[in-house]
Amino acid sequence: MLREFNWFVRVYYEDTDAGGIVFYANYLKFFERARTEWLRAAGISQQVMSAQHQVMFVVKGTAVEYHAPARLDDELRLTVVVEKLGRASVQFIQEAWCGDRLLASGKIKVGCVSASAVRPAPIPHDILEKIA
């Protein structure tokens, strides 16, 4: 497991609101992309996971705090840290930084569900090994 995964994203015009700052909900999109890249770096393909194991990850809950604004053209560093790993869920701590300024921090809980019934399912052993 990677202790802290970092992924960078540029703020585009479409990410900003009428005031010229990143719209608050877009941090959830940035966090989602960072988790996807974290999975990819760990050798986990969500498409393969669904096809081979008939399971997928879904967001169960989020709690985000906003600390400072990001603006057009800022380069953000998004972090991903596994806080807790369960049989059927993963809880992450994620942060968005611009340089040394913390912009947003959040706890995101992701559950593993069966792809067909969308009901809780254990995370497959080979995926757990890659995460842990």
Image (cartoon, helix red, strand yellow):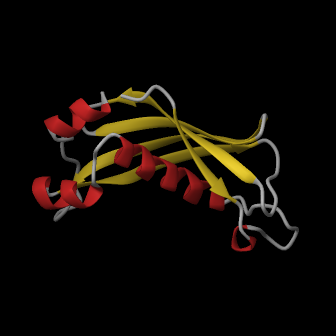
Give the image quarter of residue 101.
top right
Identify the residue at image location x=43%, y=36%.
Answer: 91
User: 2 or 93, which lies in front?
Assistant: 2
Horizontally, residue 109 falls left or right of residue 42, namely right
Q: Quadrant of the N terminus?
A: top left
Give the image quarter of residue 65.
top right
Horizontally, residue 128 falls left or right of residue 69, namely left
Estimate the x, y position of residue 44 in percent, counting from the top left. Answer: 28, 47
Identify the residue at image location x=26%, y=34%.
Answer: 130
User: 11 or 104, which lies in front?
Assistant: 11
Horizontally, residue 17 falls left or right of residue 82, namely right
Horizontally, residue 107 falls left or right of residue 131, namely right
Identify the residue at image location x=75%, y=61%.
Answer: 22
Measured along the vertical axis of the image, is residue 12 above or below residue 120? below
Estimate the x, y position of residue 5 in percent, counting from the top left. Answer: 50, 36
Give the image quarter of residue 77.
top right
Residue 114 visible at all: no
